[in-house]
Amino acid sequence: MRLSLILILIATLSIAIQAYESSGGGNYGSDYGGYKDTVPEQIHIAFGEKLGDVTVTWATRKVSTSKVYYGKDRKKMDDNEGGDCKKWELGNAMGLQYIHKVKLTGLDPNSTYHYYVESTGAVSNVFTFTTMPAGNDWSPRLIVYGDMGRHGGEPTLNSLISQVRSGYPNAIIHAGDFAYDLDSDGGVNGDAYMNRIQPIAGNMPYMTCIGNHEDNYAFSNYINRFFMPGDSQNMWYSWNMGPIHFVAYSTEVYFTDSLIYTKERQIEWLQDDLTKANKNRDEQPWIIAYGHRPMYCSNADGDDCTKNTSLVRAGLEDLFFEQGIDLIIEAHEHSYERLWPVFNETVTQFNYSNPLAPVHIISGAAGCNEQDGYCINPIYRSLGEWSAFRSSGVTTYGYGKLVVYNSTHLHWQELQTLEEDKILDEIWIVQDRHGPFAPLE
């Protein structure tokens, strides 16, 4: 009886370890035959500049080689690519200071690849991702949220891991505010957060934008931990996915004194990018923008989005209207709010059939860890007729699911992770007149 019990315990432990490792939750061996200081951690991926490009990023304690082995057959990952390893200390005095970046290029579209990373003899677990299909005749599925902490985000993280394991999303968008904060405890908190999201971010492109909690040390933790497309060090960039042109932008240019990442530089870039995107709307009819701080909100906290003199709105709303942005995804407020199509505080209609102005959705309730794990910014009432739906209760914790079915139909759901992923809200946006919006009378 005792031997049988021991065997059952061993078998259970073995299954648990296999499940943990297969999820990407841990890396091989804590000391790994003398390679303790080069064991890869914090592995995550992002889309690159072109279809078939994926960037793999990880960290080690000491300088080491950077190599990714990959292939379509999990048992035969013969292809390999080398990359860069650089030291980074600013805002990261106690964290892992060697960041590795490898670019995989020319991958086949709509194909599943397996990969592992190697740093001077120490190798990671095997991760798996699928490249996006070519063209625009398919329906991208994304998970979208903002404001997820190392501790407070646990309920959402568990649900996200399940979503990634099921193969549901094609990508994840995190609209700012990571870990609370990435630089806390000399960078150790950021390391722990990056390891916690490894089961999702190592197997699914993890696309980001900067939030206010990344402002410290001249944005160094955000700049060095992530590698997005473009040449602006993740501050603003764009990428295409099927019928969508995505635009990531910084709201922090209106609240910081950076001499490099200025609002003037961003506006110039946005103007150029969106002008080109409008000329290409036959291919990517939907333009979806995501940034951290909202332009409008009904929260009772006095934030920028509650004010008629909102800096973000003053800086971006005219441009986004003129360029015909279909959907603006925001976060920052630890709540959920959906707006009617609106411009300059004027609601153009109380439906989503051929909107005459951008639609805003605020999904910032992934779960921060301010105030002992509770991070709800209360909403007591609507601050304008533009507010179509809002929720700030304790059970609001969750994230959005975005599906663009075709050139005319977009579906959004907000899920509650504390309620077993119950649907909190959902809408269809139907738009068959994509393009710059006409001036309101």
Image (tube, rainbow, N blue to C red):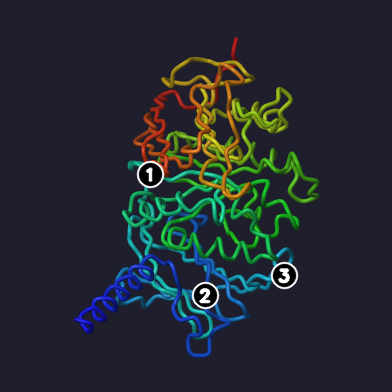
Mark in front: 1 vs 2: 2
Give the Cα distance between marks 3 and 1. 38 Å
Residue beneath label 3, please? 93
Q: The C terminus appears in which quarter of the rendering? A: top right
Give residue 88's position: percent from left, percent from top. 69, 69
Q: What's the residue at 46%, 79% (across, down)?
A: 123
**Secondary structure found at label 1:** strand
The quarter of the displayed image where residue 12 is located: bottom left
Mark in front: 3 vs 2: 3
Of the residues under marks 3 and 1, which one precedes in the sequence?
A: 3
The amino acid at mark 2 is Pro
Give residue 15's position: percent from left, percent from top. 29, 72
**Secondary structure found at label 3:** loop
- Which mark is on residue 141? 1
Q: Residues within 10 Å of mark 2 (few under 14, many from 20)?
A: many
Give residue 9's position: percent from left, percent from top. 28, 76
Tell me, yes or no, whether the two marked residues, 1 and 2, touch with CB atoms within 8 Å.
no
Image mark count? 3
- Which mark is on residue 176? none
The amino acid at mark 3 is Ala
Q: What's the residue at 54%, 62% (across, down)?
A: 194
Q: The N terminus appears in which quarter of the rendering? A: bottom left
The amino acid at mark 1 is Arg
In the depicted view, which residue is nearer to us: 94 or 264? 94
Residue beneath label 2, please? 40
Mark in front: 3 vs 1: 3
**Secondary structure found at label 2:** loop
Task: Identify whether 49 is placed above or below 386.
Answer: below
